[in-house]
């Protein structure tokens, strides 16, 4: 059996870049011509100018808040589906509410690649515990497993005793779901004296997979891999046997940007994950996920050559309410843009003497006595709050993607 799902996984960097930017140019032209939302937001973009990461990063971000707002005006998908292609076969609902389309095409959400990397093969029997009710998670994994030639038990969520009995009776060798529910199933099986030892491999997502939990599964004979996905985009990145970061899926283009902006961060710096879906049915351009991560250097030891990220590292939406005013990362970014001397900045919000205290800590190479006052004035005019300014040397701020750090403790 081959080690890779297809030849796309082992392309050279030059081959992948050439193919990706050609696809991005085609995708921008496609959405301009065939989606109502992007016909408006990208009307001034010349797709031919997209030749590298820098030129593509000049396109505006698409945020979930925009999806919600546009969907309220134009049900169900706000003008983001392509009107020159078949209509969706399913409509799903996520908190927000946000409505996502599903299509009858094989492996629409592209999960087969991640399952293959996790060792799933034709003929496997997969116990799928993701929800099939309103949200797309169950069908996402179901369609990926089916595309690989696996049979699927559509278990869904809950009914733990029945799930244990089903596993004991049918002896599936693979599991998909959250890691916490796999642990619940195993513990319930212990309690009932049932055998669920047929499960030998698993693909989990939706929750953290800390090393002790993974080790516990391994001790029971279950080899657990994880992936990163969203209801809007499908698969974004997945783990291989190398267990070194998450490898970006070949069907998306991923950027890491400074929270509150669309600007690319330096290599290895933590920032917000921004994803462009290369599929034609529901194309999302520079979709800001709100998740934090960072790029890992080099290629995976498994031989796959696509970009790798560290995995989920927190949320980029760090809005804080200060003295009755909401302060957003975008506002802090505008303060930084106003002063070229600032290389990085972080707004600290603390609770001191029963009052909010705000400090904008700025990395600057040259310390100028007048600079602090000018930055403080920008902070007041843009963020509508008064605060102190602390000028520090470059490299002083932690590399964790935080733009607003709310450290208030009310005691």
Image: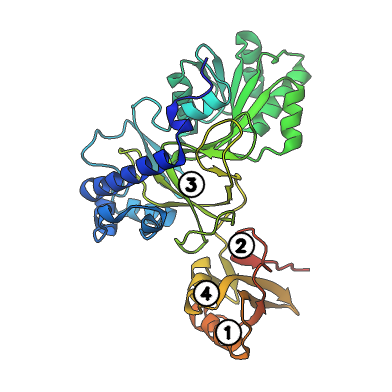
Q: Is residue 314 left or right of residue 195?
A: left
Q: Which mark is residue 336?
A: 4
Tell me what residue is drawn at x 49 percent, y 68 percent. 330
Q: Could you say which quadrant of the image residue 403 lies in? A: bottom right
Q: CA distance from mark 3 to mark 1?
A: 38 Å
Q: Is residue 159 left or right of residue 217?
A: left
Determine crowd level at label 1: few under 14, some 14-19, many 20+ residues with C-alpha closer than 10 A.
many
Tell me what residue is drawn at x 49 percent, y 64 percent. 260
Name the residue beneath numbered marker 3: 95
Judge whether residue 134 can be spotted in this image.
Answer: no
Of badges 3 and 4, the one in the foreground is 4
Q: Is residue 201 left or right of residue 39?
A: right
Determine the secondary structure under disc 1. Answer: helix
Q: CA distance from mark 4 to mark 1?
A: 11 Å
Judge whether residue 108 can be spotted in this image.
Answer: yes
Of badges 4 and 1, the one in the foreground is 4
Instruction: Indicate whether 301 appears above or below 382.
Output: above
Sequence order check, earlier mark of 2 and 3: 3
Q: Which mark is residue 402?
A: 2
Q: CA distance from mark 3 to mark 4?
A: 33 Å
- Seen from the viewer's position, the closer of residues 248 and 32 is 248
Tell me what residue is drawn at x 69 percent, y 22 percent. 222
Of badges 2 and 3, the one in the foreground is 2
Name the residue beneath numbered marker 1: 376
- Discs 3, 4 touching: Cβ within 8 Å: no
Percent position of residue 179, x then y: 65, 32
Sequence order check, earlier mark of 4 and 1: 4
């Amino acid at each position: 059996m081959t080690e890779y799902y297809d030849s796309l996984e082992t392309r050279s960097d030059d081959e992948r870049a050439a193919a990706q930017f050609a696809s991005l140019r085609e995708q921008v032209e496609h959405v301009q011509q065939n989606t109502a939302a992007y016909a408006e937001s990208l009307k001034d973009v010349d797709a031919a100018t997209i030749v590298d990461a820098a030129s593509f990063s000049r396109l505006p971000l698409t945020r979930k808040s925009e999806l919600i707002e546009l969907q309220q005006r134009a049900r169900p998908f706000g003008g983001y589906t392509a009107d020159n292609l078949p209509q969706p076969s399913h409509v799903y609902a996520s908190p927000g509410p946000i409505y996502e389309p599903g299509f009858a095409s094989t492996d629409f959400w592209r999960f087969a690649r991640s399952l293959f990397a996790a060792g799933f093969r034709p003929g496997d029997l997969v116990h799928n515990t993701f929800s099939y009710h309103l949200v797309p998670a169950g069908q996402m994994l179901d369609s990926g497993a089916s595309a690989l030639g696996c049979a699927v038990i559509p278990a869904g969520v809950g009914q733990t005793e029945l799930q244990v009995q089903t596993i004991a009776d049918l002896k599936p060798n693979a599991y998909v779901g959250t890691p916490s529910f796999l642990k619940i199933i195993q513990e319930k099986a212990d309690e009932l004296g049932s055998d669920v030892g047929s499960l030998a491999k698993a693909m989990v997502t939706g929750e953290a997979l800390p090393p002790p939990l993974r080790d516990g599964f391994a001790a029971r004979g279950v080899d657990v891999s994880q992936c990163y996905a969203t209801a809007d985009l499908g698969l974004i990145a997945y783990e291989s046997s190398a267990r070194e970061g998450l490898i970006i899926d070949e069907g998306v283009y991923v950027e890491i940007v400074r929270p509150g902006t669309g600007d690319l961060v330096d290599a290895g710096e933590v920032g917000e994950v921004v994803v462009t879906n290369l599929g034609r049915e529901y194309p999302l351009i520079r979709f800001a996920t709100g998740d934090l991560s960072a790029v890992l250097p080099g290629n995976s030891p498994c031989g796959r050559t696509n970009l790798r990220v560290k995995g989920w590292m927190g949320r980029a939406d760090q809005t804080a309410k200060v003295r009755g005013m909401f302060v957003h990362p975008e506002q802090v970014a505008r303060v930084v843009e106003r002063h070229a001397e600032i290389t990085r900045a972080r707004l600290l919000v603390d609770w001191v003497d029963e009052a909010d205290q705000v400090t904008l800590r700025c990395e600057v190479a040259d310390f100028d006595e007048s600079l602090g006052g000018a930055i403080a004035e920008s902070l007041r005019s843009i963020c509508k709050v008064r605060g102190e300014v602390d000028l520090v040397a470059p490299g002083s701020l932690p590399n964790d993607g935080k733009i607003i750090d709310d450290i208030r403790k009310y005691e």
